[in-house]
Image (cartoon, helix red, strand yellow):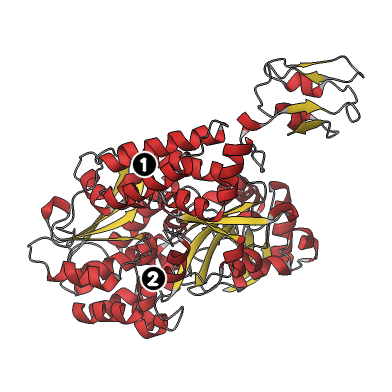
Amino acid sequence: MKIVIGEGSCGIAAGAAAVHSAIEKIIPKNSGIKLDITGCIGMCFLEPIVDIYEEDKLIKRLIKVKPEDAGKIVSAAKNNDFSLLEDITIAKEDEEFLALQTRIALCGCGKTDPTSIDDYCLKGGYSALKKAFAMDPEDIIDEIKTSGLAGRGGAGFPTWFKWNAARKSEGKHKHLICNADEGDPGAFMDRAVIESDPHRLIEGMLIAAYAIKAEDITVYVRAEYPLAIKRLKNAIKQAESAGFIGENILQSGFSCKIRIKAGAGAFVCGEETALIESMEGKRGMPRLKPPFPAQKGFKDEPSNINNVETFANVPWIIEKGGAEFAKIGTEKSKGTKVFALTGKINKSGLVEVPMGITLRDVIYKIGGGIKNGKEFKAVQLGGPSGGCIPKELLDTAIDYEALSATGAIMGSGGMVVMDEDTCMVGVAKFFLDFTADESCGKCVHCRIGTKRMQEILTAITEGKGRPEDIELLEELCEAIKDGALCGLGQTAPNPVLTTLRYFKEEYLEHIFEHRCRAKECSAMLTYSINPEKCVGCTLCAKKCPVQAISGTVKKTHSINKNICIKCGACSKACRFGAVSIE
């Protein structure tokens, strides 16, 4: 019998380490019970998750486990009696979260021990690399071409084309770079793959390096991902010891080394040429293209860059064939896509779905719909570079062409769900705040344009908007899209353009009526106390940080509007619904 604890970042944050410690302390010696860990299976809303296996068969999945559950878990495993675990056993409706997915990039997440190369190999790991070494590099690239795999970092550029360009480029030294600089708010796909299945990433990168004749691989990963870096370092050491990294790998004549570069967290370094600048010790700023990295990249030598998810698909494609991968998805968008499903959704976590599935199916069938029975309002795809898709377009297919037609983009995979209580002007401002702050400042359109847009949106959310602001925003959006140097600037206007396109009435309400229907823009709100509901409990007065509330015990209280800073502390403190917000 084997007990496996999910210890990705989400599981550890929810208390998985404490659960592990509690179980470890009470497992009897010579009981035959083995305690292992795994990464994130994707059901972040149910963490900590504990699985019980008999040999390789999952026989029980336990959710929201607490340290005090350790005794009955060990007892159940020891006696093969699970009757005492029903209160923490996953419900059938939650099992559908995984049942409705198609997993390729995430196929090992939540199943493989991320700290063990032996476990990875027992599950078929590195067999694709061995197969690749028996193929001509051109045949590997042809297999990727047949698969239709497009880069999963956001642009959706054909992977085979980039590989082929790097392979054909003249140069004594070539480099392979993995872009794990995952900067989109609400996105955590790359982190989960590295934490949960690092050897799959290594295997995919080695196959790509062999195909393009790269002698070295650099994984550029965010320094904010300490667990991912720790597990990747461990996996690299294991792969070196096993002969999968280094000189003359598996007697193939191919040699390659892997290093990790921890980035400082600049969003612009997700752009491949800015990433290269950072790798070279310079400030992360995009280069003019052409030349492209395939011709002149790291150290001015031919380089290929793909993101984590792209490489994670490669072993599956080589093992099963590009034609099998191409059977999944749509005619122009092949395979699957991983999304970080977050926001006002009942079942948040990682999902991997076939291209062509609708947004409605992901949000309602897999994600379980909107929290607290609220109405769906919009979904933000593509992070700061993406756009907001309204409820009337919920049946949009998830593929590159269909999403682009809405004004959004696929992006790296952030999917943030918003309900009726979300201010769409505020959403646009949130992303412009982020983009303006993260702009590297190299080109005027992005450096100055995003700042001007940020100022206009701030004025609108503070009730100081002008009628001409909408036209000015649209003008600025087009100018920035046309004039910015890199993808960050060119796509920065997308959140504003899509909210103007689908939620223009909210902009008009803010400007002409000084009203925020979602009641999120605090500058437009007025707080008052309903005398019919107030019982004089004094909680609101105690919580007010500026002493704007007066009143005595068991007497109706009142708010001095001249002092009130509209922080909302009184509303949160009131148990009787006496605080009105208009």
**Residue 121 image position (x, y, % from top left):** 40, 71
Q: Is residue 361 above or below residue 75?
A: below
Q: Is residue 203 left or right of residue 228?
A: left
Q: Amino acid at mark 2?
A: Asn
Q: Quadrant of the C terminus?
A: top right
> Residue 313, labelled with which disc?
2
User: Few, some or many C-alpha atoms within 10 Å of disc 1 (few <14, some 14-19, many ≥20)?
Assistant: some
**Residue 125 image position (x, y, % from top left):** 39, 71
Q: Quadrant of the N terminus?
A: bottom right
Q: Is residue 305 above or below residue 133?
A: above
The residue that appears at 17% across and 53% down in the rendered structure is 298
Q: Is residue 87 above or below residue 551?
A: below
User: Few, some or many C-alpha atoms within 10 Å of disc 2 (few <14, some 14-19, many ≥20)?
Assistant: many
**Residue 439 can be seen, yes or no:** no
* Residue in the foreground of this view, choosing between 261 and 508: 508
Tags 1 and 2 touching, CB below 8 Å: no
**Residue 513 image position (x, y, % from top left):** 64, 37
The residue that appears at 53% across and 45% down in the rendered structure is 427
* Residue in the foreground of this view, choosing between 517 and 290: 517
Lower sequence index among marks 1 and 2 = 1
Q: Amino acid at mark 1?
A: Gly
Quarter holding residue 278: top left
The residue that appears at 18% across and 55% down in the rendered structure is 289
The residue that appears at 30% across and 77% down in the rendered structure is 144
> Residue 265, labelled with which disc?
1
> Disc 1 versus disc 2: distance between alpha carbons?
25 Å
Nearer mark to the viewer, of 1 and 2: 1
**Residue 479 image position (x, y, % from top left):** 32, 47
Secondary element at tag 1: loop
Secondary element at tag 2: helix
> Residue 33, labelled with which disc?
none
Quarter holding residue 283: top left
